[in-house]
Image (cartoon, rainbow, N blue to C red):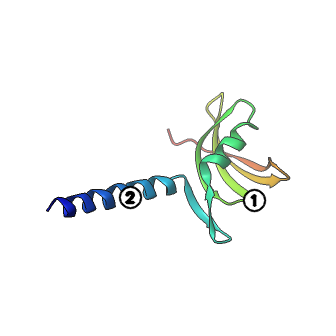
Amino acid sequence: MHKLQALFVSLFVSSLVAGAGCAAQTTQQHGRPVNVALVRHEIQGNLDGRTITAMGRTRDDSAIVYTRDASGTRHEETWGREGRGWKLANSSAIASNE
């Protein structure tokens, strides 16, 4: 009985570890996951006075990012990878429903 319990615990812990490793990697591209948390971090370093509130579709070379500026205005932004960094391609204000 103890061997069965140990096997169950081992499988359960393995599934938790595997699931945690995939949590930040959501979008597949070229057969491998994109690390959304890393993309968010890299783009956040390029924002002037805005903070990221959410991430939309994220790929190796582009990302949809939702931000809020200091005045509270929300924006939907399209970012593209340029060399080793990210460049803002488009930004549109979003009407607030608050």
Asked whether, in this view, residue 58 is left or right of residue 83, the answer is left
Q: Which mark is residue 14?
A: 2
Earlier in the chain: of badge 2 and badge 1, it is: 2
Foreground pick, 47 / 3: 3
Q: Amino acid at mark 2?
A: Ser
Q: Is residue 70 above or below residue 87?
A: above
Q: Residue at x 38, y 58 (%)?
A: 14
Asked whether, in this view, residue 53 is left or right of residue 2, the answer is right
Q: Is residue 82 above or below residue 27?
A: above
Tell me the quarter of the image containing the N terminus: bottom left
| Secondary structure type for disc 1 | loop
How packed mark 1 is, by other alpha carbons closer than 10 Å (few <14, some 14-19, many 20 or more), is some
Foreground pick, 10 / 87: 10
Q: Amino acid at mark 1?
A: Asp
How packed mark 2 is, by other alpha carbons closer than 10 Å (few <14, some 14-19, many 20 or more), is few
Residue 43: image location, x then y, percent: 71, 43
Residue 57: image location, x then y, percent: 62, 59
Question: Which residue carries the number 1 mark?
Answer: 61
Q: Would you say the residues marked 2 and 1 are in contact, meaning their CB atoms lie under 8 Å apart?
A: no
